[in-house]
Image (cartoon, grey):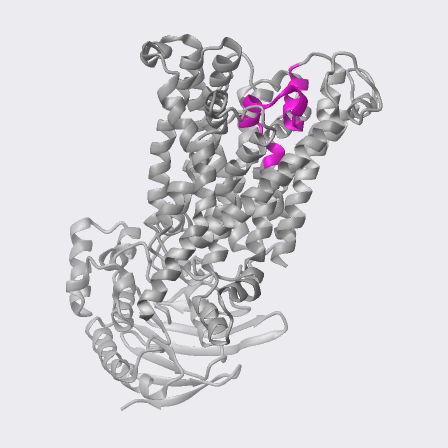
Amino acid sequence: MVGHCFEMKIRNLRVFAVPAAILVFVTAVIPLIILATSVIDKADIFSIWTKSPVRRALFFSLWQALLSTAFTIFLGLIATWYLSRYQFFGRRTFFALVTVPFVLPTVAVGAAFIAVLPRALHHSTFAIVLAHIFFNISIVVRTVGPRWNSVDDQLIDSARMLGATPFQTWRYVIMPLGKNAIFSATALTFFMCFTSYGIITILGGPGLATLDIEIYRRAVQLGDLSGATVLAIAQMLLIAIAFLLWSRSRSTELISFRAQAVSHRRLSLAPKCFFLTLTAFFTVPVLALVAASLRTRDSWSLTGWRVFLGIQNQRGFDFNFWQAIQTSGKYALIASCIAVPTGIAATYALSNRISSHSRLSAFAILPLAISPVVIGLAILITYDVQPFDFRSSWLLIPVVHAAIALPFVMRSALPIVDGIPNDLRSVASTLGAGPWRRFLTVELPLLKPAISTGLAFSLAMSLGEFGATSFLTRRESRTIPIIIASLFGKAGDIPRTTGMAASLVLIVTTAMIVITIDRKSHT
Amino acid sequence: MSLIIDNISFSYGERTILGELSLEVPTGTTTAVVAPSGSGKSTLLRIIAGLLTPSSGSIILDGKNLSLVPTHLRSIGMVFQDNQLFPHLNVYDNVMFGLRMAKTEKTIAANRCRDLLDLVGLSQAAKQSVATLSGGESKRVALARALAPSPKLLLLDEPLTGLDSELHDRLAHDLQRILHATSTTALLVTHSIPEAEIISDSIHRLQITIDIVPDGEKK
């Protein structure tokens, strides 16, 4: 009888995963199936690879991603080691400084690197790799940090006492203990760099196009939907394989660690210099944006800001910034209102007390494994014809944003949901709380950090989303990232300074949202 | 391979944790330092191992002052209170670790490893993951691992704490037998006099931050 009741509860909870499943089906599964089956001209499957822009894009995607990943992992591991093992002045601030960039708008960060680098490097692999490091170090710190933080100091002492040199201790103990997390971070970083789109739109140029850029160019500029689709599907398969390896490495994590307090060892001179350099790396591009928004070729001027704020009209600019701000804000709010409840409900239904994490990765992470550009293309093709003519609906973009934010919401909520002890629910029940009372009085308050983090993530993701939006945007409903990208496509001082001003506002707003909401939830 | 601890003191900020401590461990014997918790026993071991630098005094092993020798070159083994087995390695590879660091020739290392696992009675468990071991088995692996590179000195930090009483007594006798069989020079710190009596050849009592009072030779 008792067993029967428990079964019922499990079945009831699974219902919570339905909204997320619908969201993923509507925005990813169905469009991708339709994309794969409808527009491909069979001849393109092979012939597309003989075209030189495609080859160049594939080659460039690969090698810039390898280079970016190598540098990101190398620098990220050093930062992670000291952040997770040492107590030093400014540690918390530095942690925020390293982890926030991941959710910053890609086009705006691209603009920041234009602002800080000399003109000769504006459109270069160097700039692209720097921007990728800026974004993705956070992945390393967030994935590997908890693992290394939980390694007992005495375990490292044991290795030293068995005759291991500091280097051997790294090689044979510290690295193997972080192996799965490092592999995971490497795969995710590589994926992020390989499918880089916003950054490349701003910092790329002739010969510096990724596969995503080529997909956009084929679909939108050349009207070659079939070719674009072949590329999109090939890329998806490639990522799916990488992703499979990644999620397998995550699920085989057997060793469990206790979290350790960071030790009070002082940093020596070399790591201090490293952190100073890294601090400069994370702050100078944003500071440079301030200067760049005020600087025309030969003088200081407020024109960029005046145009941005709508005080001054500029010929050839066919957009209204206040309207764009409203659009971006509206989309972000709607996307969050969809992504947060859907994501948390789904996490709740799929958390480990009921079923395995593998289901979580299968469903909610699917959009993460597919680049937003491919999603954008698939939706463009699917919902443009009867009976699904949703293209004209303004809700389409925020719904897609919600789907893109969903895996991030779920990933950040999962440890918190899992952390709610089952006994606490039982206690509430024995004290006479029914399922709803129990949820409202016990579980909801405990879920608060998950809700805030999810909210921060989804607001930031939607505000900065560029890949999918660039396919779906319409003249009257352009978001700020879209406008920034179009400004950097124009020649002249005024578009540039205006673009810098808009980028600065977008970066500061996003960072503030993430820092305040996320910080609040942890205090 | 005798160990001489010469006037070691250690303070952390204002607090003196060890004050002018001297002690000698003769070659091939086991000496126990018995002291209550919080008396700086573990600090003493960490200083000997080179994991902490003493405020004053010196550690002399085999006539050589160790002050400037880094931990990994001291050839001192240690069994930690909670074993600290490497979770990513199996039993065999844990025991092999020190031999690999020393780049010991493969067949010699493998033989040494097998002998030690025999000695601690775990030859059957060689390929097992350390996560599957019981408390007593983990302790034996930790001991075998520490002995494998043939350290000049073995440090035992409360090695039998946390084991149930029957297992505790059995392991204490095993430990005595193994240390004797390998003629290891060892320093044991513990809070238990009966434990020290079983394992060691001589016992010293350490009073909080005061010098050691010799308690005489055990019969």
Residue A308 image-quadrant placement? top right
Left or right? Give the position of B136 relative to B51. left
- Give percent across and percent down for residue A119: 66, 17
The quadrant of the rendering that contains the C terminus of chain B is bottom left
Front residue (pair A490, B69): A490
Q: Decide whether residue A486 is among the magenta residues.
A: yes
| Residue A204 vs residue A231, the one in the foreground | A231
- Picture residue at 50% right of the left edge, 56% below the top: A416
| Residue B49 on the magenta span | no
Q: Residue furthest front?
A: A387
Place residue A126 in its image quadrant.
top right
Question: Which portion, as a residue range, is magenta?
Answer: A462-489
**Residue B39 seen:** yes
Q: Residue at x 55, y 35 (%)?
A: A399
Which of A522 and A125 lies nearest the eye of the viewer? Answer: A522
Q: Nearer the viewer, residue B14 or A456?
A: A456
On the image, the x and y values in percent for residue A255 come to 35, 56
Give the vertical position of B70 relative to A412 (above or below).
below
- Which quadrant: the N terminus of chain B? bottom left
Chief SS of the magenta region: helix
Provide residue A396's location: percent of width, then percent of height.
56, 30
Residue A80 in view here: no
Up-down relation of residue A294 to residue A39 (above or below): below
Tell me: A57 left or right of A483.
left
Residue A215 higher or lower than A93, as above or below? above
| Vertical position of residue A403 compared to residue A179: above or below | above
Count every numbered label the image shows and give the total. Answer: 0
Q: Is A82 displayed left or right of A183 in the figure?
A: right
Image x and y of residue A154, in percent: 42, 63
Which residue is painted at 80% across and 26% down in the image? A305
